[in-house]
Each structure stands twice: as structure tokens, then as C-alpha cells.
Amino acid sequence: MCIHRWMMMLGIALAMARTPLLHAQAPRLDSNSLCAEAEKATTGTALNSLKTGLEAALRAKLEAKGSRAAAQTASADGPSRAIRQLTLLNRCQPIAESWAPTLSWVLATPDALDGLASGGEIAGSWTRTMEVLHEVVTTVDGTRDGLGLRVATAIALTWSEPVMAMADAAPIDPVARCRSFLAWDREGQLDPSFRALSTWELRYVVGSWASDADLAWARANIKADCRERGKIGDAVHGMVKYTLENKDGVSVQEGRKFYGGRPMTLPIIVEVGGVCGAISRFGTSMCQAFGIPAMPVGQPGHCAFIWQKEPHQWSLNNDVSGWAESGRHAGIQMSWGNPAWLVPMMQAAQAKPAAYLEAQTLLEATAIAWGKPADDLAVLAEATERCPLHLAAWRARVALILQSKQSASLAKKALKEAAVALATQPMAFAEIALALHPLAAPEAASSAARSWFLARIDELSTMAEGGADSTLCSMAATTMLERAATAMTAKGTAAARAIVRGNAAPGGAPTITASEVKSIAELCTDGINRLDGPGGSRHAAWRQAMQRLVAGLVAQPVARDRSLERIESQVSNLASSNRADDARWLADRLVDACKATKDAELEAKATALRASLG
């Protein structure tokens, strides 16, 4: 069961232990009554009494329904609003009298409540979030509805933990940040798309690490030819020079000393330069200065950034490794996990706001009532149908399937649905498929398991052909094959993993046998070649996965000659199939892999093969 679900259930259990249900009157579960009751509960005592009443009313309403009616009941307007109210009340414990009136107002105001429910996960505390929201909405005019409310809510969620300025690590004031962005919007200084951003998207604008002064400087000093919406993220490449040492010979690795002990402001970065970290932070800040969502992301040995080059569409910039190897940068809050591909997935999930909110509410409902796997599964199946890209709902559904008495049939059904629902998100599909795999093919090393894995790669191939990102398709296939390969060796799991991932072979005595390497190579070659196709994302995915496999096989000293022959055979097959470019490309990858082994004889063989191709 997912951690999120366990935490919610624990919070409810603790809340119930504190306040007996008998002491509160259950409210009527219609929207008008729920809003009216919330509006009257302006103290901590009254809010906790409301919470207890909501628990009683929802349990009585929801637990009376069987599996078929559970989702429909939880989705009805009144019960769904009560679920969101109760979820927020459970999160915001203990309630402080200082912000109790604001919590009451949120519970009574659908746009405020729904904005918090749809705003994504937080890294800090909900009590801190409510404290910040109270401070903002009671201080800054125009934050009770519309864009002002979305900005205030985004700030409250982002400031669930302090946001520090990159220039000097000083805390950024959330109230001042709210005032600034609303003023800049009124003055027409932001891109018009700012007004259409959701609460979740706004978090990656208002949470900028640049100071307000730096953001104003960015707008005033951006190159004239980069002021167009689709070029703002590229402005950094003409403004910040890649610099390893400053004019005094101080290395960029010296941190603040590289900038002469001065704060790392945007104008100082332009003056001195920097490497990938400074470039990506500058590019992120430049986008945010114009009201465009952006964030830095980590890649192996590198820092890149992602931004909405087009409204509601995320793109990589300063990129080296692609989406598959990009991940959350320290200090950035993301939903569902750390891989960067989760950001465009969340964006796509929220493309239909009502459907996303419905799925989120159904997910939260399973932590409140029923407790019966059949009912919970019905609710979660409905959630994934209403919002097919809601990954948290998929994870919760899978967790329950693994516990169900009908797990095999449920797993087969869920897997079939996931292949369609997650067709644009191959890594998410791979995660769900691998979680269900033990139910589909219990014998991990059996022929049935081999067929199962190859069938999943066929599905990934279809996703790539449909335009899914090539780096995600290839990494999803690699992840699938890694699971299969590690089950094919008795002691050499690390070696098997290295073969598929393209890493150097583990040191020490060999733990994998020649026959195991042969079996892994056969499976992986077969699987990866299923990705192959004429051009586009599918062909690119094949190349990426094949490059990793070639590097991994050659790096493994056990059965290296046989592995070399296998790759040479594939090169020859490509050449004889009128695919000379691919043959030369694969031979080049073989040369690179052989060079890395420092084995002169091996390198000579690969080089001779490459020369024979012209």
C-alpha cells in the first residue's frame, strides 16, 4: 500500500482517537449545508467538532454502499465536497486559533478548497501551509477569488517549507512575493499565459529562487530577440557564458568565492559566468520573471532545466540526458516522486481539472470509509477511469490488487487498462506493469515470464510509434529487461543489472556464469529489437536501449568473446538489410565500448569491423 495512503489512514485514526464521534452532530451532506456549517466553524474547537461530524456522516453514507455504488456515491457533489473538507481538516492538525478563521473560510469556499486539493503534494507541513495562506489572504488585497486566490494558494503550498533565495540563502517573504506577482500582472509585465495557469502550475512561478529585484532585472535586461514567448528560456545561452574559472583564476567549484564573495544574483552571474548549475538556475529565473513555469532538474553529472516553452507544455533546456535521466532538483517540490517526467505527466493529468479533482477525491475517499478491498478497488478503478493519468490512484489500485483474493484476474484487467491509459507515459506504465508482474507470471525465470516481458516491450514499441518520448520508451524497456535479467542469474544480479544498464561490470570475482550471460543477451537483444522501427521516436528508443546493451555486454568480461560475436552478427544483419547507416552506427558504439575496456585486441577487432563498413 502506498505511503500516502497509510499516512492518511493513520492521521484519521489518530484524529478519531482524540475526538469521540458521539460528541458531534453529523452535518447534512449537501453542498450548501456543508459550506454553511464550515462558515460557522471559526475556532479550533468548532472545526474539530465539524471534523468529527463529517467523519460520522461520511461513514454512515459511504459504508452503506456496496462496491457498485461506492464510487458513484463518493463522486456526488455533496459527499465529494465533504471528503475534501475532511481530508483538509485531517491534514491541518493541530489547528491553531490564529489561522482557524481562514481554514473555516477555505472549507466554505469551493474554489479555495478545490485549489488546495488540486495543487499537488507538499514537502513541508499543512499547518505551515495554512499559516502562510492566512497571512497572505488577510494581508494582500484581491486574494480571495480568481487569479489572486490561485496565486495565494500556490504560495501557501510552496511555502509549506521556507523558500530560500539562491543569491544569499535568505528566506523569501511569501506575502511580498504574492504582492509582487499580482502587481506585475496588473502592470502587464508578465506573459498573458500567466493568467491561465492553474494553482499547481503557479507553484513553479511564484516559488522562484530569484529575488523580486532579480526578477525585475531579468525582464529589463533580457535580449530583445528573446522576448518572444517561445524564446525566453533560451535567453540564458546568449547571456551567461560557460566559465570554469573567473578572471582571477578561482574555480567554479569554490562556490561563493567564484563570485568574489558576492551574492549570486542574476546580474553577477551574467558578469562572471558559471557552469551548468548557474546556467540552468538563470534560465529558470528568466522564465519565472515573465510568469512562465520552470524549474531546474538534475541529470547525471549535470544540471538542466525544464520550462513551459508553450503554454501548459514542458520542454527540456540545457539538456544532456533527456527526460528519462532527469530528476528532481534539491529544494523543488514535486508530486508523485522524483523523476522529472512526472511533471509533464501531472500537467497532462490536470488538463481536465474536473476529472483530476474527481480522481483525487475518490483516492482520498478510500482512506475515510469502507476498508473493504472490493469497495476500495471499485472506487480506485473509477478514479483511474475518470483521470487515466492520475498516477497516485494507479499506485493505490495496484497495492490493493496485490492483496485481493482475485488478484490474478484483477491484475490482468488493470494491466490491459494501464497499457491504454498510460500510452503517453511509458515509465509510469513500466512501474505499474512491474508491480503487477508477480501476479501475472509467478515464476520469474520461466518461459511464461519471458513471453510476458516481451509482450510489455511490444506495448512500449506501440507507445513509441504513437509519439511517446524516445528516452522514456527506451528506459522503460531497459527497466523491464533489467527485472527479467536479474531473475535469470543465481548470484549475479549486480552483473545482470550492469549488462542491461550499460554500466561497468562489478569488480571482484565473477558472480555470473557464461550461460547466464548468454540467456540475458538473447532476451535483451530480442526485446530491444522489438522497439526497432523506421524513424521517429521508436527508432530513437531502439538506438538508446541498444547502446546501453552493447556497452554492458562488452564491459562484462564473462563470455565477452561470445557477446562480441553477437553484436558483430547484428551489425552484419543490418548491413545486409540495406540499413548501412544503422550498421555503421552500431559498429561505432561497439568501438566505443571496446575502447572503454582498455583491451587492445578487442578494440582492434571492433575497429576492423567498422572499417569494413566504409
Image: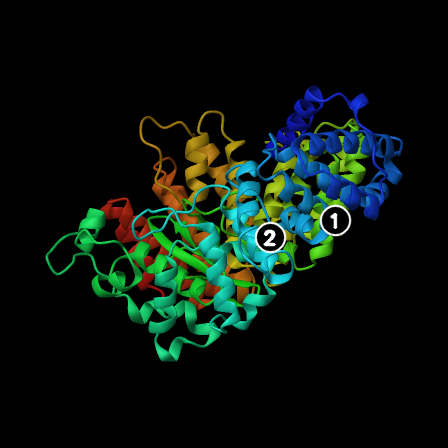
The three-letter amino acid code for the residue at tag 1 is Glu
Is 601 on the left or on the right of 66, as rendered?
left
Q: Secondary structure at mark 2?
A: helix
Residue 418: x and y in percent read: 69, 47
Question: Which residue occupies 72% across, 42% down?
Answer: 84
Considering depth in this image, is 142 or 537 the residue closer to the camera? 142
How crowded pointer 2 is (Cα within 10 Å; few <14, some 14-19, many 20+) is rated as many
- Report the mark closest to the observer, 2 or 1: 1
Is label 2 in contact with label 1 (beta carbons under 8 Å)? no
Q: Residue at x 40, y 27 (%)?
A: 511
- In this view, the residue in front, 30 or 33, is 33
- Residue extending furthest toward the bottom: 225
Specify whether 456 is left or right of 299.
Answer: right
How far is the residue under mark 2 from the one under mark 1?
15 Å
Name the residue located 47 percent from the left edge and 38 percent from the top edge. Answer: 518
Q: Which residue is mark 1?
A: 358
**Quarter of the view holding residue 557:** top left
- Residue 28 screen position, x and y as percent: 86, 39
Above or below 74: residue 528 = below
Residue 539 or 34: which is nearer the viewer? 34
In the displayed structure, 577 sits above or below 95; it is below
Which of the two labelled residues, at mark 2 and mark 1, occupies the earlier sequence position?
2
Query: x, y percentage for residue 239?
Result: 29, 69
At horizontal 66% and vertical 39% (from top left) the residue drawn is: 88
* One can see residue 453 in this view: yes
Dot 1 crowding, Cα within 10 Å, few <14, some 14–19, many 20+: many
Numbered tag placed on residue 346 in the rendering: 2
The residue under label 2 is which amino acid type? Met
**Based on the displayed image, in which of its 4 quarters is residue 247 positioned?**
bottom left
